[in-house]
Image (spheres, rainbow, N blue to C red):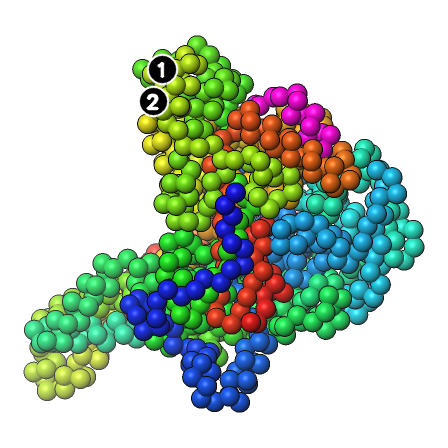
Amino acid sequence: MLGFFLRRLLQSVTVLFAMSALVFAGVYAIGNPVDILINPQADQAEIARATAALGLDQPPWRQYWTFLSGAFAGELGKSFVSNVPAVHLILERMPATVELALTATLIAIGLGIPLGLLAGLKPESWFGRAIMAGSILGFSLPTFWVGLMLIMVFSVELGWLPATGRGATVDVLGVEVSVLTWDGIRHILMPATNLALFKLSLLIRLTRAGTREALAQDYVRFARAKGLSMRRVVRVHVLKNILIPIVTVIGLEFGSVIAFAIVTETIFAWPGMGKLLIDSINVLDRPVIVAYLLIIVALFVLINFLVDLAYTALDPRVRLAGRTS
Amino acid sequence: MEIAPSSSPHPDPLPASAGRGAFWRPLSVIHHSFLACLAGLAVPICLAAAAAGAAELRIGLSADVTTFDPHFVAAQPNLTAQQHVFDSLVRTDERSRPVPGIATWANPDPLTWEFTLRKGVKFHDGSELTAEDVVFSLERPLGITGSPGGYAAYVRPIVAKEIVDRYTVRLKTATPYGALLQDLAEVMMVSKKAAARAGAQDFDSGKAAIGTGPYRLVRFARGDRIELARHGEYWGGRTPWTKVTLHVLPSDPVRTAALLSGQIDAIEHVPSADLAKLRRSPDLRLEQTVSWRTIFLHLDQYREPPPGVAAKDGKPLDRNPFKDARVRRALSKAINRSAIAGRVMEGLALPAGNILSPSVFGHDPAVKPEPYDPEGAKKLLAEAGYPDGFRVTLATPNNRYINDEQVAQAVAQMFARIGVATRVEAMPLSVYFGKARNREFGVALLGWGSRAADLALRSLLVTANPEKGYGAWNWAGYANPKLDELVVQSLGTVDPARREALARSASALAAREVAFIPLHYQVVTWAMRKGLTYSARTDEFTFAHFFKPQ
């Protein structure tokens, strides 16, 4: 277990290192934020002063070195446009994104697994077919279009739900949470559904395929022959056996939901990290871009680790490498 | 001169039940009560609804506010939010002209500006604004480091600041400088007591964001919203709104949808694609005015040959064609400006002839847009020695100005008609401005808004001179000693009337010489629910205190 953990850590640090170099070079190649943000009335001396104050007049390797030495001291730099530490900016936005991603994942799990089971148990029935047809739509419709349609129907036409933004928040242990207020729930419903759509379809298909495969297995037939009710067979034997691939996908997808909530956040003006990244790219706010990507990579590493742990809990045959079986 | 009507309500061309107007009708409570009011059904309820509606205003802004430190990044979205909370020493009216606000001014001599503060101007913490706060606020921008675009440029011309008494400040400049008022209109006054040792986070949290403006900062939720509450002791009288929320909604369709659904009361920068739809809506109205922003082309007039310019067969030209005024005029004549304004811009533009738009200080009304004349253009090209034309690359940003890339495409087709084969190179502004500053473009599209023509010309067309700070944006490498002299003289004139006459002749000279090719002045649009009016500002700023209930 410890050896596994250490190896993972080493791999992650290498990945983080390579990532930071790539992003740094990329943003450097695009241009200089002073060119975009400088006061139009500024003269040449003022432009030179601003460039020097941000260290952007230095050769790129020196700028990278400055960044690295800061990073080792736990300091990822201040945002060029907000004048606050980049990490602070990202952490300030993180609760909103995590909340959105968690709600979307819950919607996907809460609807996806039961619907997938239904479709898998009765594949030829009309509702089994309807569920599968719906999941094709969920796969193929682009997120931004669905988002705009949701806004048009539920906000503009029917006036049921607010079109944009995050609702009222309450403070839970220092974290702003919006799903605990009615206003917050009304605000999160559409963006979370929009974000969940793809994963929901994925889970439906995965559960259905797993169920159909499991139903044909001998142990299921034997269980039925033994006289167990179908209910119990499904709950204890089928579901537990198909859960491993589903947990993997949920785990991996949770990382990508956080990282790629950008489109949904942009459409619904959701004040999360993804929107921050887009805004930062537009003005070449390098410290924020680099810090954001580093945090996302760290997040992926952590989630993968947790998924591995979840395997062992679900399937006693799986042993984490490092502990010989 | 045709000028779009300022602050005119647009009558609804369709009855409420007709076509898509009805399709888009939002079904919110506000509108139900509004319809009930129209029908005269329940007068007491109407009054109650009107009073409740009048108390709060929710506005959709088009860009993110990065910080609440009013001296950190001088970007328009930041100024928009911050000027609700902070006053500047000099105010500007709807036409962007300096007017007295918290202070009046006089010039005892051309090097001295004496500002007399209004008595009893109260900060949000109850203390009074004094000369100490003014001097502190004028010095603070110089001490701010690590900003990619600070306010130092606005206060650097001031070489001495003197507190005469509690309500009088005397400022000195090294040479006479007429644009000081326009510069000071950008610099916001903070409370010395609150801001003296404050960092950026203290402003964001509201602790240091203590101003004298009409609203005090309640909450700055970055990337989401800014909540403001009425400042009870505001020197300018009571504004109609007790509570104002500025929602950050950069995505165009989302901003429109939020307005249509009744979630917010007004939006700025109505996208041209949604204009017709909003105009048809029976529950909404629009306000428009000509923006200060002019869209124009910079032509490289100093390199042999300029980047992207070549003969039709791809061989390099033996000289720079743009150095010849006849070629520049031919290109200008080739452009059908009213077609661009009417079709590409869908009415959100006026054909331009000046460097700055009609309401701005120093605009010369005698200078008309160059008439569309492709035949005359061909003749001029032939005279200049290019009967077959040549080849150019036109660079443009594609996410900065209204329909910028489409405008460049239209111009390219018009150039092609007189034999100048034009390729458009469009890129996001983050890439564009870096390349432009490296002088990688031969023909570049740019937009410029400024409070005065002499200020714009100093940056754009005066011969580049880093020591004096002239021509920082003169990518064209344009050099005309006569223009330089006029602009320097204009900026050095303190008397506004004499300065405007000089600025006008400088504008006229730049236009006459075709130093640049003006395309159009942008028109800026606000949309709001019925029952609201907005005093449309030429500087494109959106201020809650300029909204009034009808």
Label 1 Cα crowd, 10 Å radius (few <14 / some 14-19 / many 20+): some
Q: Residue at 38% x, 73% y: name it.
A: B26
Q: Could you say which disc has been placed on residue B254 in the image?
A: none
Q: Residue furthest top?
A: B318
The spot of residue B244 in percent (x, y) is 59, 69
| Sooner in the amino-acid sequence: mark 2 or mark 1 | 1
Q: Which chain contains the residue that carries disc 2? A: B
Visible residue check, residue A21: no
B432 and B499: which is toward the camera: B499
Report the magenta stretch's main SS: helix
Q: Residue at 45% x, 56% y: name it.
A: B270
Visible residue check, residue B26: yes
B327 and B206: which is toward the camera: B327
The spot of residue B377 in percent (x, y) is 40, 23
**Marks 2 and 1: CB-CB under 8 Å?**
yes
Label 2 Cα crowd, 10 Å radius (few <14 / some 14-19 / many 20+): many
Q: Residue at 58% x, 28% y: name it.
A: B510
From the image, tell me which residue sits under label 1. Answer: B387
Q: Is residue B144 above or below residue B388?
A: below
**Residue type at the position of mark 1:** Pro
What are the residue bounds of the magenta stretch?
Answer: B477-490
Q: Which chain contains the residue that carries disc 1? A: B
Q: Residue at 59% x, 76% y: name it.
A: B55
Residue A129 belongs to the span the image colors magenta? no
Q: Report the side of A53 relative to B316 (left or right).
A: right
Q: Report the side of B328 relative to A134 (left or right).
A: right
Are the residues flagged by discs 2 and 1 from a single subunit?
Answer: yes
From the image, tell me which residue sits under label 2. Answer: B419
Asked which secondary structure carries label 1, the reply is: loop
**Residue type at the position of mark 2:** Gly
* Real-space Cα separation, disc 2 to disc 1, in angstroms: 8 Å
Asked which secondary structure carries label 2, the reply is: loop
